[in-house]
Image: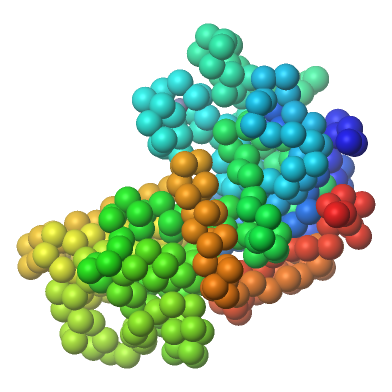
Amino acid sequence: MGAAPDQFEGFMIHDAKKWTEFKKEKARLNQYDVDIENECCGVCGSDVHTITGGWGDLATTPLCVGHEIIGKVLRVGSKVKSFKPGQRVGVGAQVQSCMRCRMCKSNNENYCPHMVDTYMAPYNEKGGNADLSMDDSQKPMKDSKGNQIFSQGGYSSHSRVHEQFVFPIPDNLPSEIVAPMMCAGLTVYSPLVRAGTGPGKKVAIVGIGGLGHFALIWAKALGAEVTAISHSPNKKEDALALGADHFVSSGDKNWAEPHAFEYDFVLNAADMTNEFDIAQYLSIININGEFHNVGLPDQPLPQFKAQVFASNGSKMGGSHIGSKKEALEMLQLASKIYEKGVKPKIETIDISEKGCSDAVQKVKTNKVRYRVTLTGFHKAFGTGKN
Ligand SMILES: NC(=O)c1ccc[n+]([C@@H]2O[C@H](COP(=O)([O-])OP(=O)(O)OC[C@H]3O[C@@H](n4cnc5c(N)ncnc54)[C@H](OP(=O)(O)O)[C@@H]3O)[C@@H](O)[C@H]2O)c1
Ligand SMILES: [Zn+2]
Ligand SMILES: [Zn+2]
């Protein structure tokens, strides 16, 4: 068992205008409870929105992104019962919540108002310690100069995470394949199961990127009839191989017409919904069905008339990652179907200043098939060896 250092090393961004320039630097390790030696980390579309400043200014610099982390437990806090050193674990897009509110107590901790994102979020010193008063457990963590400490992500050597947000990983799943399930996989698994996806349901997945390609796999495994809707016709073969029964090319002008009233649930994992003709997407929904957004574009959704809901009684909603309960269910499903040869399509790039830069540019230009996992952490940091 090694000891976690007080500092971690990570590939950091200093300026949203220079979002392709990663610098390897030391920074303070600022999270607690389960210490993890990172082995690999997926590259999410959200990392790109963050470092480009698309979602707003960088709240702290230098900033280390990455929230699809697989690693090995180094040590655990005194109250942690469910993990032991040496165990392989994963961490997604959340590292803390209050652990006492209605949301936290109902397997909805991903909606806790005190949630802390894995990176660029103000970190609470004792957040998640439900033995303390709310005031004590929600105290901002400050450095010696009194500055707020922010969470830092997984393009780095180590992570420190509240145990609620650490997931045990089934033995048969390779690390580079399971890493992107921590955010991309869970973010689509949660709304699919909450919508009752299963036999007899027709589900359409819009945007076949990192999230969308997991959605095809899960929706098929859950027993639904699955349609991939993509503005990239060259993704057809892959979409069908991943589990889609049908492929619809949204680049074709009147693509929606033949599919009017067809789908019970449309899961939108595309990034550029601000450019969509929303009325077209709502027209393909079955009576009282839902258009569900997990994609979070930089720009607001386009305006559309309220009348579009009147034609089929459709609804529009959205969601944020998933709960630990759902993460554990998803991992069981992934483990089971992996034995039958069903697995995501993952590219690997060794982590380095250039590797991080190449990876985020590939995501930005829609060139990834279908998720990049940054690997080779042992070469960059000396961590993550088996
Ligand atoms: N809600 C949450 O909790 C949560 C969690 C993680 C990520 N996200 C968000 O989910 C979105 C997808 O993330 P990701 O990692 O899957 O990204 P990604 O791999 O880049 O996939 C995005 C997909 O959007 C589609 N797309 C791109 N440009 C488009 C355009 N101009 N018009 C129409 N479609 C376009 C593409 O699919 P096609 O080529 O098939 O059209 C692309 O593969 C991002 O906005 C991300 O921030 C949300
Ligand atoms: Zn993500
Ligand atoms: Zn809470």
Give residue 259's position: percent from left, percent from top: 20, 81
* Nearer to me, 281 or 299: 281
Q: How many marks?
A: 0
Asked if residue 44 lies left or right of residue 257, the reply is right
Instruction: Determine whether 261 is above or below 198 in the image.
Output: below
* Nearer to me, 85 or 348: 85
Please identify the quarter of the rendering in which residue 83 is found: top right
Give residue 37's position: percent from left, percent from top: 80, 44
Name which residue lies at 59% across and 38% down: 165
Q: Quadrant of the C terminus?
A: bottom right
Instruction: Determine whether 255 is above or below 309 in the image.
Output: below
* Nearer to me, 98 or 310: 98
- Residue with the most extreme top position: 133
* Nearer to me, 252 or 127: 127
Name which residue lies at 37% across and 25% down: 102
Asked if residue 364 lies left or right of residue 24, the reply is left
Q: Is residue 170 visible?
A: yes
Instruction: Determine whether 254 is above or below 375 in the image.
Output: below
Q: Is residue 235 visible?
A: no
Asked if residue 63 lies left or right of residue 223, the reply is right
Q: Quadrant of the N terminus?
A: top right
Give residue 87's position: percent from left, percent from top: 74, 43
Name which residue lies at 32% across and 50% down: 194
Give residue 305's position: percent from left, percent from top: 15, 63
Please identify the quarter of the rendering in which residue 109 is found: top left
Name which residue lies at 31% across and 69% down: 224
Please identify the quarter of the rendering in which residue 60 is found: top right
Asked if residue 370 lies left or right of residue 71, the reply is left
